[in-house]
Amino acid sequence: MFNKILIANRGEIACRVIKTARKMGIGTVAIYSDADRNALHVSMADEAVHIGPPPANQSYIVIDKVMDAIRQSGAQAVHPGYGFLSENSKFAEALEAEGVAFVGPPVGAIESMGDKITSKKIAQDAGVSTVPGYMGLIEDADEAVKISQQIGYPVMIKASAGGGGKGMRIAWNDEEAREGFQSSKNEAANSFGDDRIFIEKFVTQPRHIEIQVLCDSHGNGIYLGERECSIQRRNQKVVEEAPSPFLDPETRKAMGEQAVALAKAVNYASAGTVEFIVDGDKNFYFLEMNTRLQVEHPVTELITGVDLVEQMIRVAAGEKLTITQDDVTLTGWAIENRLYAEDPYRNFLPSIGRLTRYRPPQETAAGPLLVNEKWQGEAPEGDAAVRNDTGVYEGGEISMYYDPMIAKLCTWAPTREQAIEAMRVALDSFEVEGIGHNLPFLSAVMDHPKFVSGDMTTAFIAEEYPDGFEGVELSAVDLRRIAASCAAMYRVAEIRRTRVSGRMDNHERKVGKRWNVALQGQEFDVKVKADKEGATVKFADGETLRVASDWTPGDQLAVVDVDGSPLVMKVDKISGGFRIRNRGADLKVHVRRPHQAALAKLMPEKLPPDTSKMLLCPMPGLIVKIDVEVGQEVQEGQALCTVEAMKMENILRAEKKGTVAKINAGPGDSLAVDDVIIEFE
């Protein structure tokens, strides 16, 4: 076994590999760019080596720099994580030439299956059903349009060396094919150092289901069930679960056996994933094979009890698999939500900045990386479990240079329904401040009827949120629960305030019992009767709710019991009440005395400034291109400029017809959120 492993990656996956290496007694080496000097993975590793400037194409994906770090540290093996160099055959060859073990598949398997064009040709030759497409190299945008017309719209434009949604576009017409080809090519070059593009038919009603395989160098191979990855946005997975709520045992077995056969055909040795599109009749079609560890691997670990990183290390050290197919048991249900540094209220555009508050929910024993390490496919103690894979910490910064994912929150429970409920509570308990993030959206998905029923496709987000995410409207029942809780909490805060002032001994009488609670456009008149165990809140229509909590003023998380049911809320103080966040809703809750509520209705409403004649920068980023000039008339939907942030190019378009009056930025300029790019007459 190895004594020292270098992790050629950053962020949460580097931290994840370090945890398993530490458990195995193996020393670890981190690499870092200038932007990651104070990153969590650097502090967790036993050693760390600096490799260059922040951009990945000047640091993390420069093979020579990574090789220098290996030589400096004396590492015997390298785990590449995912992304960056994980599927780069030249990197694997460089390691082999250096006599350093690659914790991944052989070079031949990477070349055969890591390249999407080659892998699809091999799959076709092997008789595997594949999606129609053009597998040859595409020289320019004109050829891309011609090929797209021949295949028939819609088409998927994909980077050959891509992954993680980078370099991927859906085109529904010639114009989108032309734009998508160039953007995909640029993103592929920036992210992977390989700008080759291919095009395939986009299946309009697919489910994205993938099979986890594990093979050794002695001819043994197994599959560890499937993962449902259909909840995607911009071809980037957002929610994953294992097993799939759609597959039956027969389809699972057929997909698993085909995935293992494909892996063995290229002498695969390591953990890998075979991705399929599955239609409504459970017909499945090979998409690609990812010759690396997947982002969503934790859900497989949680239902099988198999530490995939440990198995990868053991296979790289030449060991045989000790697990047979008969040993693989799928126990319970696991769900993963990806926490991204992106603003759901701004069409999920990237957000950067300092994490002024970062408090994940408490992790509980589940699987190989947490407390109960004896669990191998058997349910852990308790009804549910929580796991959070992360690479950040409170006070750290989210950089514009890398992928916006900052954590993977996972829950496990005996049933899917219980796993979803555990995830709801975990999301409500997750405190993140200082940046835009998608926690509200994830909460909304967990409550969405289509997700709860398991009836979803990869078009779920586009179909259910066609105009973007604008928050959640809570039900009348939920509003009453929050109103009752806030009335009881505000009463506690007012009693403390009067005690601090020292103006009156009878604090209860000073505070009073009658309150008006206003939230989400509704008002409730309530009467709060408190005792040592909590408070009984009576509404004007006679309904009563019993509220109990140990919340004290200043706490930013309130765990409340309302009539025997838990309610978890993130709490911020505002004038005359609270800002409450719960289940994807962001509410201003005003708690007033009845006469104050009457006066509040007379206050004029403050209107926001008029920005209708301005193009504002929706996220921190770099201007790549300006497509218009002063005096030019533009039409609705016309491209105005391109902004790059976190390795993704975003084309900003005109919302309506107008004439350009002033351009305030040009290519190469770095802009902040709401900086004015273009002004219109």
Image: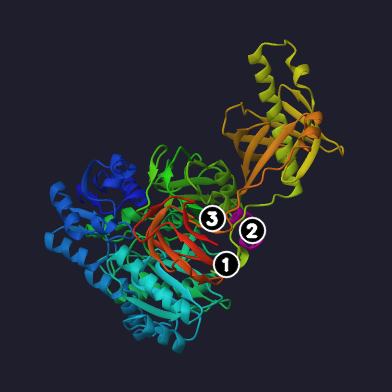
Which residue occupies the extreme right position in the image? Answer: 541
Tally of numbered tags: 3
Front of the two marks 3 and 1: 3
Magenta segment range? 444-453
Q: Pinpoint residue 372: horizontal percent, then vertical percent.
A: 43, 42
- 446 or 299, which is in the foreground? 446
Q: Secondary structure at mark 2?
A: loop
Q: Is residue 519 magenta?
A: no
> Dot 1 corresponds to which residue?
462
- 469 or 239, which is in the foreground? 469
Q: Secondary structure at mark 1?
A: helix
Q: Is residue 447 magenta?
A: yes
- 315 or 558, which is in the foreground? 558
Q: Amino acid at mark 2?
A: His
Residue at the spot x=42%, y=74% of the render?
180
Q: Pinpoint residue 402: horizontal percent, then vertical percent.
A: 36, 54
The correct choice, above or below, for 427 with respect to 559 in the image is below
The correct choice, above or below, for 450 with respect to 77 in the image is below
> Dot 3 corresponds to which residue?
346
> Dot 2 corresponds to which residue?
448
Q: Pinpoint residue 511: horizontal percent, then vertical percent.
A: 75, 21
Q: Could you tell me how far apart the alpha carbons at marks 3 and 1 are, in whole angstroms?
A: 15 Å
Q: Could you tell me how far apart the alpha carbons at marks 3 and 2 are, in whole angstroms?
A: 21 Å
Looking at marks 3 and 1 on the same chain, the residue that comes earlier in the sequence is marked by: 3
Q: Amino acid at mark 1?
A: Ala
Q: Pinpoint residue 194: horizontal percent, then vertical percent.
A: 28, 70
Q: Do tag 3 and tag 2 residues touch (Cβ < 8 Å)?
A: no
Q: Main secondary structure of the magenta part?
A: helix
Q: Amino acid at mark 3?
A: Arg
